[in-house]
């Protein structure tokens, strides 16, 4: 191939290599949240695999352009097509399994409450599976998901740090897992002692059908980790994380498609140059030689 064709293909593959970085970053971010926050360890690996595949394929195409290996460029375009399809499938899948479920606003509370009945579909069935939830709840306990709940405020009279008051706690913006797993549901009408210690209030009626009220335990290794509200909080956290990565991948997919189309055009033009094929109208040749000789 001539220098112009290889240069364009080299630029296209370099851009593709750069595109793999945010894909890998999204997968690594999900993996970090799986170990410390969401405790869901199955979606980050396809994303990381796609990112690594884009990186390897782009290097393969770059090598094919530099060393003028046509078969490598063919393989690059073929593999990149399936990577684009896989990335598109992930984006559709991520939005499809997180299409339902939002937090509910509670009066006099800044944080939202989460109910398992607001969710359905494959992701809910996956999370609520008994064996799988045992793994998730153990991850939440071992990761000290509720340890960051404790806060102190300075007493204006003494200047000393004291535990925050109930009103201060109710004005906090809790994460879905903190709201669902680290405190009893508001419908239980439990009295606030501190962020993770609540006592029943006999004088206040509770929601009769809310079984989470009976599952709450002030033991810091139990809390509400077996509550349906905790499962709903995990689902809400997954929805938030997955949609962030999916939106990033939509941008990456658009760029990847543009780069892929440019790569196809560059490869086709480079082949024409290599085969010494003329372009446009110049490609029209006469099938019969002219009778006039000059």
Image (spheres, grey):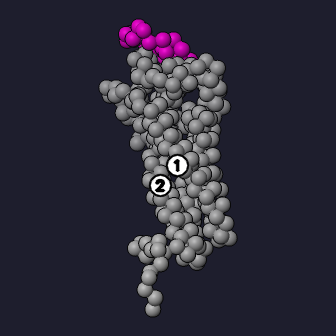
Asked whether residue 82 is drawn in magenta, I would say no
- The residue pinned by badge 2 equals 257
Judge by depth and name the residue closer to the eye, 135 or 113. Answer: 135
Q: Of helix, strand and loop, which mostly describes the magenta segment?
A: loop
SS class of the residue under badge 1?
helix
Judge by depth and name the residue closer to the eye, 33 or 290. Answer: 290
Residue 141 appears anywhere in the view? no
Left or right, residue 280 beside residue 24: left
- Alpha carbon of mark 2 to alpha carbon of mark 1: how far? 7 Å
Q: Position of residue 273 (x, y in %)?
A: 55, 74
Start-end of magenta stretch: 198-217
Mark 2 in CB contact with mark 1 (< 8 angstroms): yes
Left or right, residue 22 beside residue 156: right
Q: Residue at x 41, y 41 (%)?
A: 157
Which corner quadrant of the image does residue 107 belong to?
top left
Q: Is 34 drawn above or below residue 5 in the view shown?
A: above
Q: Quadrant of the N terminus?
A: bottom right
SS class of the residue under badge 2?
helix
- The residue pinned by badge 1 equals 84
Answer with mark 2 or mark 1, whichever residue precedes in sequence: 1
Residue 4 appears anywhere in the view? yes
Q: Is 73 drawn above or below residue 284 in the view shown?
A: above
Judge by depth and name the residue closer to the eye, 89 or 273. Answer: 273
Asked whether residue 212 is drawn in magenta, I would say yes
Q: Is 254 drawn above or below residue 262 in the view shown?
A: above
The circle on residue 217 is: none
């Amino acid at each position: 191939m001539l220098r112009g064709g290889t240069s364009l293909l080299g630029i296209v593959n370099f851009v593709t290599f750069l595109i793999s970085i945010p894909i890998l970053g999204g997968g690594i971010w999900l993996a970090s949240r799986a170990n410390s926050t969401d405790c869901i360890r199955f979606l980050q690996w396809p994303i990381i695999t796609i990112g690594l595949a884009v990186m390897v394929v782009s290097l393969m195409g770059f090598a094919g352009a530099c060393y003028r290996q046509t078969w490598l460029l063919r393989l690059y375009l073929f593999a990149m097509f399936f990577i684009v399809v896989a990335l598109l499938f992930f984006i559709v899948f991520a939005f499809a399994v997180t299409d339902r479920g939002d937090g509910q606003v509670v009066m006099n509370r800044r944080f939202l409450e989460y109910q398992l009945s607001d969710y359905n579909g494959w992701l809910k069935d996956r999370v609520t599976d008994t064996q799988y939830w045992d793994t998730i709840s153990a991850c939440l306990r071992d990761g000290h998901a509720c340890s960051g709940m404790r806060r102190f405020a300075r007493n204006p009279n003494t200047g000393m740090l004291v535990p925050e008051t109930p009103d201060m706690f109710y004005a906090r913006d809790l994460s879905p897992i903190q709201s669902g797993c680290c405190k009893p549901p508001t419908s239980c009408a439990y009295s606030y002692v501190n962020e993770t210690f609540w006592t029943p209030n006999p004088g206040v009626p509770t929601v009769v059908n809310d079984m989470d009220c009976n599952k709450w335990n002030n033991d810091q290794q139990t809390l509400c980790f077996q509550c349906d509200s905790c499962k709903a909080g995990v689902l809400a956290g997954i929805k938030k994380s997955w949609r962030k990565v999916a939106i990033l991948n939509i941008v990456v997919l658009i760029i990847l498609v543009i780069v892929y189309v440019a790569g196809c055009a560059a490869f086709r033009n480079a082949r024409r140059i290599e085969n010494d094929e003329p372009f446009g109208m110049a490609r029209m040749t006469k099938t019969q030689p002219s009778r006039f000789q000059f």
